[in-house]
Amino acid sequence: MRRCLQAVVLLGAVLAVPLSATAGERTARRPTELAASVLRAIPARDAVRHAGDRKRAVALTFDDGPGPATPRVLGLLARYRAHATFFVIGRQIAGEAAVLREAVAGGNCVENHTWAHVDLRAAAPALRRQQLGDTTVAIARAAGRRPVLFRPPFGATDASVNLLGRRLGLVPVLWSVDTRDWQDPPPGVIAERALAGARPGAIILLHDGGGDRSRTLAALPAILAGLRARGLEAVTVPELLAGSPPSRTGGALTR
């Protein structure tokens, strides 16, 4: 376990900047770290549900990848000049370095969703550290950047899980809009749910893995076009928080 945590620290130092600066990365250049001012706005025992409303932007987030749908999600984001945050499962990263680096090169973020999609709240402390630590190492090696966020599977978290994440350099992020696309509703329903809660500071939950995501893919153009029609920009979670940190009131933070 100690070796795992030491590896995280070493990789964090080595991969504080991209391994290579492609033209895509140079033109995309979007916040991938969290400023000290943002971190101060988030108590160590709390998780973020949504950002403040000072920036006309929302964060689209995709869980449970990388998977077969991920490259198509990236293609749609690029077509609409939108960006998103991908919370990936560590055991699925092997063989997917190219798609994760494509995500990063396109200005998106690749973040931590544990190694095996376990309920961290029910896990023993050592297993919690392993699930988060091993995934951080795998993301750093594959994507070329160390994650700064984690999303607890099932949204199952508490003060102790949140605090552990912060000690590992990861801010816990939940969501304010649940499309429930994992239930496989029609694309129009997914889009309607996403847009119904789309207001400045919203964090919208979608999935690019964990099953057949064809209906999510079919809904995504309507979501992206709908956000644009509302004057809302789709940005990464770090960018959303940089432009408008969460408030300590109004339900933006939770344990």
Image (cartoon, grey):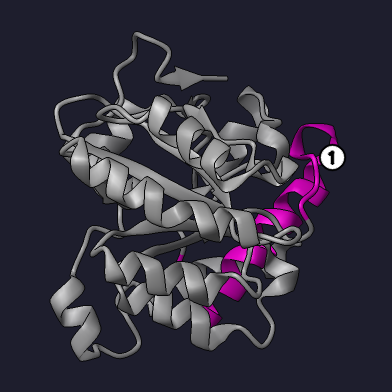
Can residue 212 be seen here? The reply is yes
Query: Which stretch did the figure color magenta?
Result: 117-146
- Residue at the spot 75% in from the left edge and 47% down from the top edge: 128
User: Image check: 92 left or right of 221?
Assistant: right
| Quarter of the image where one finds residue 244 | top left
Quadrant of residue 232 in the image? top left
Give the residue pinned by disc 1.
Answer: 123
* Relative image position of residue 202 (x, y in whole percent): 36, 31
SS majority, magenta:
helix
Q: State yes or no: residue 138 in magenta.
A: yes
Q: Is residue 93 magenta?
A: no
Q: What residue is at 80 percent from the left and 47 percent from the top?
A: 118
Relative depth, front residue between 25 and 6 = 25
Vertical comparison of 117 with 244: above or below: below
Q: Is residue 5 visible?
A: no
Name the residue rendered at 29%, 30% in the picture.
201
Crowding near pointer 1: few (<14 within 10 Å), some, many (20+)?
A: few
Front position in the image: 215 or 236: 215
